[in-house]
Image (cartoon, rainbow, N blue to C red):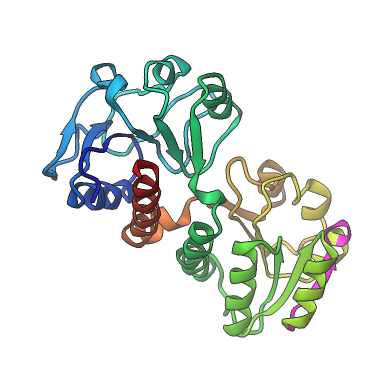
Amino acid sequence: MLTGIKAAIIGGDARQLEVIRKLTALNASLYLVGFDQLDHGFTGATKMDLDDLPLGELDALILPVSGSGPGGEIDTIFSNKKIYFTEDILQKTKQSCTVFSGITNPYLTKCTSNANKKHIKLFERDDVAIYNAIPTVEGTIMMVIQHTDFTIHQSNLVVLGFGRVGFSVARTFANLGANVSVGARRSEHIARITEMGFKPFYLDDLENEVESIDVCINTIPAPIITSNVISKMPSHTLIIDLASKPGGTDFRFAEKRGIKALLAPGLPGIVAPKTAGKIIANVLTQLLMDESN
């Protein structure tokens, strides 16, 4: 149980509803900021404005999966009010208050560091990332089907990156009958790609690997699908960029060439918010229990 724990959930999307549901069921006291348009009521949860939070009493600040914007802006689908997260807010919380988010950025990292607050990035945890890969892959399949006029079976598909998401994407599309090539930088990843029966290549050779592809799926949050790469792709190629914003694709050049390129971070929250929310809620609950002991 989380009796006695006080936490503020600031903004977010439908995934946060599962977090609210789980934490209130365990008797935590919650303050909801950016949820004024939420019709559903939760026993043990109170809607309020950011300025009214009892910051000095909070054990946890739970931010959206995306953390904050580069200027501290907080995304929420349950309010039209603008919400900004600042270092001053953190300075007013007690020293033991922990900040939770899915990912971070330089602004948020600077705020938590300057305020000397513990910041847990949930998506850096292997368990969350692996569980989250499931709805990510399902959403990617959905997008490929929606935006192509050919079957996945026997299509030529390139996956960039062989981390937790790239691994699951490559394996699933291969199981659907695609001819899967995987680009990676590390030699041990090249070995694993080979062992799993995919065609491996080093990312330095990417320009030479896209001349006959149908679909390119990127998981690397760095400029990887450049104008030089896009210029070598067939005009019918579909690019799906799963990396966090701004992605790793030159979207402007892709549009100029008439190649469809879609930035799709946060797919779990779009295609399966209930499941994605439960993944976050379960891990968050355990972490809060550990923090309170």
Residue at 53% across / 58% down in the picture?
Answer: 129
103, 172: nearer the viewer = 103
Is residue 182 magenta-colored? no
Residue 192 coordinates in the image, percent (x, y): 76, 75
Residue at 76% across / 50% down in the picture?
Answer: 224
Is residue 204 magenta-colored? yes
Image quadrant holding the C terminus, namely: top left
Q: Quadrant of residue 256?
A: top right
Asked whether, in this view, residue 45 is left or right of residue 219, the answer is left
Residue 88 coordinates in the image, percent (x, y): 43, 14
Residue at 39% across / 18% down in the picture?
Answer: 89
Where are the magenta residues, as a range?
197-205
| Relative vertical location of residue 203 with respect to residue 201 in this rendering, above or below | above
Asked whether, in this view, residue 179 is left or right of residue 164, the answer is right
| Relative vertical location of residue 144 with respect to residue 119 in this rendering, above or below | below
Residue 114 coordinates in the image, percent (x, y): 56, 19
- Hey, which residue is sitting farthest front in the picture? 293
Q: In which quarter of the image is residue 230?
A: bottom right
16, 232: nearer the viewer = 16
Asked whether, in this view, residue 51 is left or right of residue 111, the answer is left
Q: Is residue 214 visible?
A: yes
